[in-house]
Amino acid sequence: MIIAKEISKVKENVREWKKQGLSIGLVPTMGYLHEGHASLIKKAREENDRVIVSDFVNPIQFGPKEDLATYPRDFDADCRLCESIGADLIFNPEPCEMYEDDFHSYVGVNTLSEGLCGKSRPIHFNGVCTVVTKLFNITEADRAYFGQKDAQQLAIVRRMVRDLNYNIQIVGCPIIREADGLAKSSRNTYLSENERQKATILHKALEQGEKMVRDGETDANKIVKTVRDIIESEPLAKVDYVEIVDWNELQKVDKIDGPILMAVAVYIGKVRLIDNFIVENSIVIEMV
Amino acid sequence: MIIAKEISKVKENVREWKKQGLSIGLVPTMGYLHEGHASLIKKAREENDRVIVSDFVNPIQFGPKEDLATYPRDFDADCRLCESIGADLIFNPEPCEMYEDDFHSYVGVNTLSEGLCGKSRPIHFNGVCTVVTKLFNITEADRAYFGQKDAQQLAIVRRMVRDLNYNIQIVGCPIIREADGLAKSSRNTYLSENERQKATILHKALEQGEKMVRDGETDANKIVKTVRDIIESEPLAKVDYVEIVDWNELQKVDKIDGPILMAVAVYIGKVRLIDNFIVENSIVIEMV
C-alpha cells in the first residue's frame, strides 16, 4: 500500500492508473477508522480496480468552538486497517499541503446545508464540500463512498456532484452499528462508560420512529414528538434537534408523503452524537 | 463542427476523445464572438487535439440590475467563426440545461473577488466560478483559455484551479484591441457612434499609466491620479474605479514593488467598459 503525504504523489499514481484504464474508488475519511469506514473501503474494493482512502482531519469543517484539536487520531492503526482490506493508497496530507496560506476558494450547497446540523454548525458543510472537491480533483475517482450515518453530508455531496457536473458516482452506504445499536463513530471514543451505555437511546428512539413510519403514520410532528420524548427520558441526553425532512431538499415536513430523512443530534454529556434513518419509499407507495 | 445543446452530448464526445488519448482545449465564452475570442480559439487550436467553445450567457453572473436580457447574441455568426477557426464542438446550452430548478451549489474565491469589479458586482465572480467549474467538469479539458481583458476573472479562475486542484492549465491571452486602442468587447456594440469615439480614453489613459510604471514611477497613487485625471477629462466618461493592485491577491498597493495590475472600469454614457494592463516584472527587477 502506498502512503502519500503529498498531493503530487497521489496525482502521479492516479495518472499512471488512468493511463492503464483502471477505475478508482475514493473513500474520504477523517481517520481513526472503525468498522463503518471499513465497510466503505470494502465496498470500494469490490467495485474498483484501485482504492484510495484519504485520511485527513479537515480543519475548515470545524467551527472555532468545535473539537478540531482533540479529534482522535491513530494513523498507524488506520494504515493497518486499510492494508488489511486491500486499499492501494492512503492519502494523509498535512493541513498546509491542502491549504496554502493564500487559499481563498470555497464550494458549497445552499438550502440543503441550512437545516439539521447546518444550524449549529454554519461553516461545516462549506468546509466539507471544499475538501471533497479537492479530493475529487486530486484522485479523479470514478466512485466515492460516503456513509449514511452523515446523511445530510451524503445529500449535499450528491447535490454538489449533480449541480456541478462532476464525473463521479456517489455511493451511499448503510450505517454500521455496535451490537447494542449505537451508530459507529470516531467520536464515540469521547464517551465515558456510563455515557456509552446511555447513548443507545438515540437508536432506540429512532427505531420507534421508523416503526411508526412503516406502520403508516404520516403525521411527522407526532413521530418527532415520540422520538424526542424517548430521548429526553434519558437524563444525560440533551437534544440538539429531532427532525423529519424530505430526502431531496432536506426541508421540514409536516406530512409524510414521499422519501424522508429522520435525523437526530443529541448531546450525551458533552459529546454530540448524530443518527438517522431514511425511508425512500413512503408508506403511500408501499401500501399499493 | 459538432453543435451541442445538451451536457450529455458534450460528455459523450469528450469520453470518446479521452479514450483516444486526445487533448482538449476549452474556450469559455458568452457568445457574440469577436476577434478577442477568435484569438483564444486560435491559440486553443494550436495547442490541443480537440477544441470546445462554450457559448452561454451565464445568468448567475449578472446582477438584478445588469444587462442579462439585452446582452447581445448571434449564435449563427458564432458558429461560422468557430467553424472557420477549426473548433471541433460548440456548446450552447439553454439556461435550464445548466441550472435545474433545485440547483443550489456555488463556487467562489474570497479576497480576490472583493475589490475592483467585485465591489459593484458582488455576485459576479461567484457566478463565474460556478459556471467555469461546471464547464471544466463537463469538458474535462486539459487547458482553458481566458482573455487578460477580464484580468480579475483570470486571476480568480487561476486561484480557484490552484486551490481546488483542478487538473487543467489556465492560459491567459493578451487583450485584443481595435485600431484606435479600444479593447474588443461584446459590450462595445452598446456604444453610440459618438460614445464609441470617446471610449478610446480608457486605453489612452492606461498607456500613460503603463509608461509611468515602466519609466520607474513606484508611487501607485500618483499613477492612479494621472490615469483618473485623463479619463475624467472626457465629459462622457464616469469612473467606476481606477486602481493599482498586486497581481496575486488583487489588493490595493501604494508602492509598486512587484507584479501589479492596473485596472479601470468606466461608464461611457450608460455603457460600462473595463480595461487594464499588467506589469509582471516590476521596475525593481527590470532595473537590475
Image: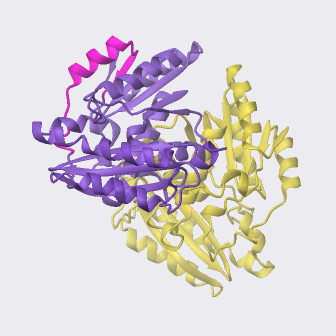
Chain colours: A purple, B yellow
Residue B61: x and y in percent read: 60, 63
Residue A82: x and y in percent read: 33, 18
Quadrant (top left/top right/bottom left/bottom right) for the N terminus of chain A: top left
Residue B110: x and y in percent read: 41, 58
Is residue A121 at least partly visible in the picture?
Answer: no
Nearest the viewer among B116 and A72 is: A72
* Number of callouts: 0
Nearest the viewer among B59 and A27 is: A27
Residue positioned 14% across, 42% down in the render? A195
Residue A175: x and y in percent read: 39, 33
Quadrant (top left/top right/bottom left/bottom right) for the C terminus of chain A: top right
Residue B74 sits in quarter: bottom right
Q: Give the magenta range.
A: A68-92
- Residue A113 placement, left or right of B146: left
**Extreme residue in the left direction:** A193
Q: Is residue A117 magenta?
A: no
- Residue B208 placement, left or right of A54: right
Nearest the viewer among A126 and A176 is: A176
Residue A41 sits in quarter: top left
Residue positioned 66% across, 27% down in the render? B23
Q: Is residue A29 above or below residue A116?
A: above
**Extreme residue in the bottom direction:** B235
Is residue B62 at least partly visible in the picture?
Answer: yes
